[in-house]
Image (spheres, rainbow, N blue to C red):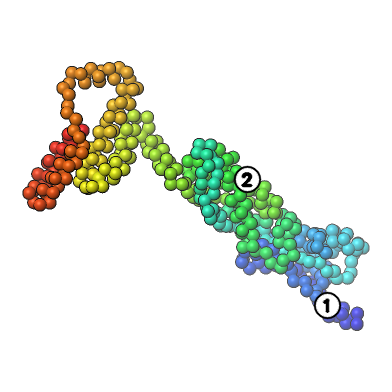
Amino acid sequence: MALMDFIKKQFIDIIQWTETGDGTLAWRFPMAEMEIQNGASLTVRESQVAVFVNEGKVADVFGPGMYKLTTQTLPVLTYLKNWDKLFESPFKSDVYFFSTRQQVDQKWGTPQPITIRDKDFGAVRLRAFGNYSFRIGDAKLFHTEISGTRDVYTVADLDGQLRGLVLQNISNAIASSGVPFLDLAANQIQFAQALAAQLVPEFAKLGIQLEAITVQNVSLPEELQKILDQKIGMGMVGNDMGKFMQYQTAQAIPKFAEGSGQGSGIAGDAMGLGAGVALGQVLAQNLQQGLNPANANAAAAAAQQQPSVAVINPADVMTTLEKLGELKTKGILTQEEFDAKKAELLKKLV
């Protein structure tokens, strides 16, 4: 019976793995009812690592190359088996192949806004997404920590774990980058570098080497986006106070017109335009006078010499424009006559 069992056994002469490109990270060579022949050939291709496991313990690790399996090429396994200098009989061992090529274009993102702490705004929420690439850096550690005894372990099996590590380290990355929250969108490379610095040691604990990570977009909350837009606008204006007031007035006019013109589109336009321009002029004059007392005194003296001008009530102008609009609609006033009256009334506002 022992002789028949020996004859039925299948002996492995060639051990190799041809990757299929389906995102496989680890693959176990089929060893069911088979043993490795003494002197068998092991082929490990570029971007591969082969690991021999004996009774659940990692024995020998082979990088790219062709090997003849003997006691010289399997020193650890030879020691574990207590073989003599040369073994003649076949032996049984689990052989795992690992792909060490770079796995590119792996996506990451925040499924929900995450809360971070910012030195300028306190607690804020953001969304971000990008991609990253990685490879197996330590096949032995990856086997013991991640893939284990599974026949096949793929990139998809690891995806959730790696995404979780990215999201977990975003807050620390922002804090260590030193980039103010409002500037994150304009400093995505610096943000990505800080994120990579946080992730490299975390990936290494799994036997994985992070190759690159990018931040493709940072979405700011609506209220902070408005502040960023204003900051950009002020950067375009510079230190010119007059232009600053013009910029502020331009920002205020649409909102003012929207609030004041609910009753009539024409009157709303008049109120928004006239009041906005008048507001801008008053603020600019007050600001200049506050910065230069001499100008303030001169302005006060000039005001005393000039005759007083009657104050026009914007509400009266609005009422008048509404009536003029009705007259134009009825055909009593022509478009030219209406435009002339409208211009005359708007001049009184400024």
Report which residue position mark 2 lands on.
198
Q: Amino acid at mark 2?
A: Gln
Task: Return the residue nearer the eye: 127 or 46.
Answer: 127
Q: Is residue 57 above or below residue 182?
A: below
Q: Amino acid at mark 1?
A: Lys
In terms of secondary structure, where does tag 1 sit? loop
Residue 91: image location, x then y, percent? 85, 69
Residue 106 quadrant:
bottom right
Quadrant placement of the C terminus: top left
Q: Is residue 247 above or below residue 165?
A: above
| Mark positioned earlier in the residue sequence (1 or 2) | 1
Q: Is residue 34 above or below residue 345?
A: below
Q: State the residue lying farthest toward the left.
A: 332
Residue at 34% x, 29% y is 241
Determine whether, in the image, residue 298 is placed left or right of residue 74.
left
- Marks 1 and 2, how far apart at CA: 51 Å
Give the label on residue 227, or none.
none
**Number of the front mark, 1 or 2:** 2
Q: Is residue 33 visible?
A: yes
Residue at 74% x, 62% y is 148
Q: Is residue 187 visible?
A: no
Residue 154 quadrant:
bottom right
Residue at 14% x, 37% y is 344
Determine whether, in the image, residue 139 is placed left or right of residue 230.
right
Task: Return the residue nearer the eye: 194 or 181.
Answer: 181
Quadrant placement of the N terminus: bottom right
In terms of secondary structure, where does tag 2 sit? helix
Residue 101: image location, x then y, percent? 64, 58
Report which residue position mark 1 lands on.
9
Task: Return the residue nearer the eye: 56 or 125.
Answer: 125
